[in-house]
Image: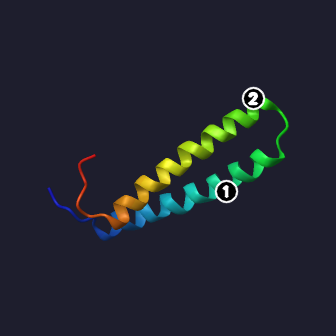
Amino acid sequence: MTKYLALHETLEVHELLVFKNLTLTKSATMNKLVQDPELKAILTQEVTAGTAFISKLQAYLTDRSERNE
């Protein structure tokens, strides 16, 4: 199995990273404005999950040694 992403795969991961950063920013911003505790909890979970997902995507773009996770 190859350790490197093809150019089109790299671009697709980058596109996902940009989109997830946008949704994470929106969730974090809205979390500060929301007053409903249930919605605040959902947004907090989204921020936590989004941060973890962004870290994984960044790993695909930077660390070329671990591809089989």
Quarter holding residue 34: top right
Q: Residue at x 23, y 48 (%)?
A: 68
**x and y, in percent, of residue 47 in the image:** 61, 46
Quarter holding residue 40: top right
**x and y, in percent, of residue 8 in the image:** 35, 67
Q: Is residue 19 above or below residue 39?
A: below
Q: Residue at x 75, y 29 (%)?
A: 38
* Dot 1 alpha-carbon crowd within 10 angstroms: few under 14, some 14 to 19, many 20 or more: some
Q: Residue at x 49, y 63 (%)?
A: 15
Q: For the residue marked with disc 2, what is the amino acid?
A: Glu
Left or right relative to 57: residue 22: right
Left or right relative to 53: residue 41: right
**x and y, in percent, of residue 18 in the image:** 54, 63
Residue ID for mark 2: 38
Tell which circle, 1 or 2, labels the residue nearer the N-terminal end. 1
Left or right relative to 11: residue 18: right
